[in-house]
Image (cartoon, rainbow, N blue to C red):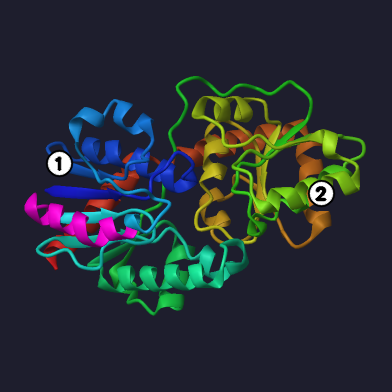
Amino acid sequence: MRVGLNLMFLVDEAGGAGRYASELAPALLEAQPGLLLTVFVNRDAPASLSEASWAGDVEWVRLPTRFSNRTHLAGQVTALPAIAARRRLDVVHSLANGGPPVTPRVKRVVTLLDLIWLHQQEAWGSRAAVRTMAALTRVSARTAHRVITISHAARNDLVRSFGLDAAKVDVTPLGVRLPDAAPRRHNGPPTVLCVAQKRPYKNLSALVRAVAELHDERPTLVLPGAPTAYERDLRALADELGVADRIRFPAWVSDEDLEALYANATCFVLPSFIEGFGLPVLEAMARGVPVACSERPALPEVAGDAALFFDPTDQSAVTGAIRRLLGDDRLREELSAKGLERARQFSWRRTAEETLASYRRAVAE
């Protein structure tokens, strides 16, 4: 099988979509030896991609476009299909909510990670930008031979919101890479970690308020991620509540720095109002960090019985969950053990195998 991966969206700060892309490619090669993989990237693609251990096993096509301007879309709808046809690819798989609507003689698979941007439009810039994204995503979904999504909650939302045939949509959950070393036991001062984009739907203000309410525990809250307008709101709230000295806002961090943040965390808490999957929950579990998170789609689907759940609209519930985790050693140990077991059920090999099955369905149609 000849497969093209459309990673034209990929830049250094691509978040969960970037993790998906960088892990899926090598997992596909491992799951199907002999797979001929062509990877399409833009001129701003992370240098770490070409330095990866699997980089020599794929063919790279670097188009002279930038993700930050309109040449990105032009490259996807003109240059990419022409190159895919010339290379006689069987499938082109676009990994981040959109791809070329026409690829002559080549089947199209598109991953729609979620539709959060459609339901939380105020966090995604202008209405015109959202309308453009909605139009492109709908066209990509309706013209694709197969659509992949990453949770049953996201699949149900996609079918309901876009009117797609449910039989056309495959669910392929994301995976997590288990660390080589055994998880470290945290013995330092109480630290609450949340790895999430700084957008309003992540509900990070509930964590800031919780810090202010945890008078006895006095935890430090760590919120890594690229700065946004919402971060300014969070900083202002922290100042207003008198807890600015206990909240850290590191910008985008490298994988090595992220590992250090997980190792230093007493617990991981994600208070989102909605998630397409919630990959940081799995990443925390894989490192033995006890997790508390919202009881909102798709987090229960991912966390199973290995997390402490709360209603994200109830501040007392958010604060209470953190208080329980910080104050109960036995509970933390129990959730740590359950989290490790839960994380083992989500491998990138499984993601790759189910993705290959979707490719075969596309080719067979």
In-image side of 65 versus 230 (left or right): left
Image quadrant containing the C terminus: bottom left
Q: In the rendered image, which residue does mark 1 sit on?
A: 35
Tell me which secondary structure the magenta stretch mostly adopts. helix
The residue at 61%/21% (across/down) is 184
Magenta range is 73-90
Answer few, some or many: residues within 10 Å of disc 2's Cα (few below 14, many 20 plus, some between 14 and 19): few
Tell me if residue 238 comes above or below residue 361 in the rendering: above
Residue at screen point 20% across, 67% down: 102
Q: Position of residue 205 (x, y in %)?
A: 76, 52
Callout 2: SS: helix
Task: Specify whether residue 213 is in view.
Answer: no
- Foreground residue, 338 or 100? 100
Q: Estimate the x, y position of residue 163 in percent, counting from the top left.
A: 39, 80
Disc 1 or disc 2, which is closer to the eye?
A: 2
Q: What mark, if any, has residue 236 been given in the picture?
A: 2
Give the Cα distance between marks 1 and 2: 52 Å
Report which quarter residue 331 is drawn in: top right
Q: How many marks?
A: 2
Q: Amino acid at mark 2?
A: Ala
